Image: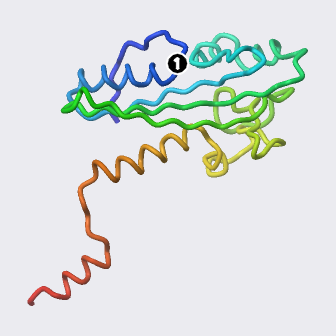
Amino acid sequence: MLNQKTTEIQADDVDAIAKTSALEAARKSNMPIFVEDAGLFINALNGFPGPYSSYVYRTLGTEGILKLMKQVTKRDAHFYSAVAFCDSGKLNSLTYFSGRVDGNITLGERGTHGFGFDPIFAPSAEPNTTFAQMIQQEKSKHSHRAKALRKFAAWYKENYVRFRPSQKERKKKEKDMPI
């Protein structure tokens, strides 16, 4: 994994942040790069914390969000992830993928797995279970990040991975080779 420092633009758009970071990292490293950025968007708070989720988590934490939501009954929220890919050989070619999971902010923290706002976010598909109560395999079924990365991986495999014969094709070729 390459740990390339980039300037994170301050923007309300997670897609723009990921795209800008991928382009800058590809230019600096002279390598193909993908960058992921994400945020928690709470409807009752007009999308806050959104792309500022990491900072808000470090400063307010889950307790601070719960305090802001104390009198709120409509607790709809979503996590959104953007994965941007830039090939340093094609700097004008930037591709991105997104993933989203809808859910609700719970009334209190539940669970010990995961990180960030996982203890207070329950996805709509599992409304009685927070991300922090799920093991990683279960969370990945719903995760915004997993959705975006699966889209990227499928695209990357189709567009960047050199053709590799299947095991069946390799065995056939071996069988047809003279001894």
Secondary structure, mark 1, is loop
User: In the image, what residue occupies the spot 41% across and 48% down?
Assistant: 153
Up-down: is 169 above or below 70?
A: below
Amino acid type of the residue tagged 1 in the rendering: Asp
Location of the C terminus (image quadrant):
bottom left
Q: Quadrant of residue 124?
A: top right
User: In the image, what residue occupies the spot 46% across and 37% down?
Assistant: 97
Q: Nearer the viewer, residue 64 or 89?
A: 89
Could you tell me residue 175's position as x and y percent? 20, 88
Locate residue 72 relative to residue 4 in the image: left or right: right
Location of the N terminus (image quadrant):
top left
Locate residue 53 relative to residue 119 in the image: left or right: left
Could you tell me residue 172's position as x and y percent? 24, 84
Q: Residues within 10 Å of mark 1 (few under 14, many from 20)?
A: some
Residue tagged by mark 1? 13
User: In the image, what residue occupies the spot 84% across and 27% down?
Assistant: 108
User: In the image, what residue occupies the spot 56% across and 37% down?
Assistant: 99
Up-down: is 6 above or below 31?
A: above
Q: Quadrant of residue 174?
A: bottom left
Up-down: is 18 above or below 168?
A: above
Q: How is the image coloured?
A: rainbow
Could you tell me residue 104's position as x and y percent? 78, 31
Residue lying at the far left of the rendered structure: 178
Q: Quadrant of residue 167?
A: bottom left
Residue lying at the far front of the rendered structure: 92
Total label count? 1
